[in-house]
Amino acid sequence: MRIPVGRHTPRQSDAWWRGAAALLAGALPSLAFPAPSLWWFAYVALVPWLLLIRSAGSVRRAALDGWLGGIGFMLAVHHWLLPSLNVFIVVLAALLGLLWAPWGVLVRSTLGGRPCVPRALAAVAVVPSGWLMVELVRSWQGLGGPWGLLGASQWEVAPALRLMSVGGVWLVSLLVVAVNTAVTLCVALPHVRTAMVSALVVCALTTGAVWMWAPHMQRDGQIRVAVVQPGVIENGDARFARSEALTRALAGQHVDLVVWGESSVGQDLAARPDLAARIAALSKDLHADILVNVDARRSDKPGIFKSSVLVGPQGPTGQRYDKMRLVPFGEYIPARSLLGWATSVGKAAGEDRQRGTRPVVMTLPDAVRVGPLVCFESAFPDMSRHLVRRGAQLIVAQSSTSTFQDTWAPAQHASLAALRAAETGRPTVHATLTGISAVYGPDGGRIGRWIGTSASTSAVYDVPLATGTTPYVRLGDWAVYGALAVLAAFCAAEGTRALRRPAPEPPAPPSRTAHESPARPAR
């Protein structure tokens, strides 16, 4: 039968529809993140994707379903980057989506067919462990960092925040994917339904036990912090003047620290002593140090740096933190000689900014120790953890999402500070130029009100300090190592099973008829 050129066969049409379904299924979990913030949806959002992959007719198809779903997920969670990266975001999503191809193979291997009850129970641990490896790899700063981790969708759920204090956001990602896996098996395989319901009960009881058992941080006084958010002002001098006016209006409110957002000062203070003197005068009037963020070419070393600078009544105190982890394409272009063309299709960095070399913990006049982070550094669990291990009592993240003002990005970014507070047991201030600004207590709970993206104002927060060490700060990323151990054990078991499987018997030689012989075979 000859197929007319330009027409698709039924099999080809089915493949196209299946590919579209994989893209859509992968995008569904994005609804659990701010701004939609349907946190409860995260526990079933992967079910359509898992059902699709388990029905794949081959390993290749499962890998393709995993890849296409990964593309859908990356595009949905990062869609607000489209104005900046233009078509390049599709290229990035396609590259990062490849990380889910092996996960697709893993899902088909564990959920496909008609697994027995022990294998189904093993899948509830293996599938989340595979997902966590994907999150871990894409969390590398050069690949964009840990933005959109599935556990981060639970930023306003108290039991989940308690889990983070024990195992970080990684532990919550494991829990969310485990629930999705159990629900998928409940839907697809009635014969394992009782076991899966039992697994869901165990997840719930474990979460409740951790909620009750995990140590609470002991409150140890408070600090009065003011956040200054000037709003969307393109001109650097006008933005500085607006921040100055908002700060001056705080007089008489007895603040201990004033925080300005990322890039709040556009020129090096050493080269502009007049600007340094204006900030110092504000500090003297308020009897409080001011943490500004300088985005400028430094006078003492080559290159542009983003730096948190503490200014007191006498001027800059000498305590300075240079941003260490830069935003790919936004602040530097990886392999610029190869990817420099990205500047022609989007708003990629025209010049690479320079990196700092070490974290810094600053000391205020009242001896409170502050650990600064800049921009998307607040997405990295290890950075705030290291600051607390160095003695930080308060974490301050200075940010600006003005480029993405009317998107999901400001709310997503503001929510990350809740995770860092819960993980470390230290209050966290998220101060921005243009909103959303927010403050969270040592348990990750919100303090006061968010300052929205439409506001040009300041706000004062009474922030409780805390002592003690969370299990996550003490033990680190043990959940990641546990997931690695689960995958290693699964691979070893699969390898052993393959070795024990009897080899197929060689086919019997064909029987000869009466009319054939070795010299003259039949035709």
Image (cartoon, rainbow, N blue to C red):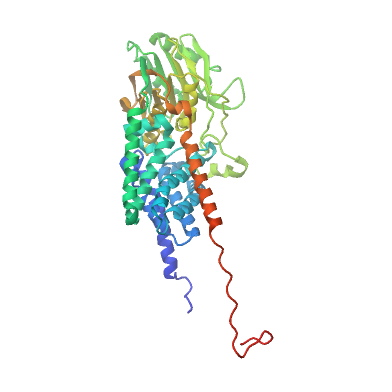
Residue 221, compared with residue 29, is above or below; it is above
Place of residue 395 in the rendered image (x, y in percent of width and height, measured from the top left): 43, 23
**Viewer-closest of 47 and 357:** 47
Would you say residue 494 is visible in this rendering? Answer: yes
**Viewer-closest of 287 and 127:** 127
Place of residue 316 in the rendered image (x, y in percent of width and height, measured from the top left): 50, 14
Instruction: Answer with the quarter of the image where residue 404 lies.
Output: top left
**Viewer-closest of 139 and 255:** 139
Q: Residue at x 62, y 42 (%)?
A: 337
Place of residue 339 in the rendered image (x, y in percent of width and height, measured from the top left): 58, 44
Please state, as top left, top right, bottom left or bottom right, where the C terminus lies in the image. Answer: bottom right
Residue 491, compared with residue 136, is above or below; it is below
Would you say residue 145 is visible in this rendering? Answer: no
Q: Is residue 215 left or right of residue 143?
A: left
Residue 74, compared with residue 302, is above or below; it is below
Q: Residue at x 38, y 55 (%)?
A: 51
Name the outermost residue toward the bottom.
Answer: 515
Residue 339, compared with residue 4, is above or below; it is above
Please count the marks in the image: 0
Place of residue 405 in the rendered image (x, y in percent of width and height, measured from the top left): 38, 35
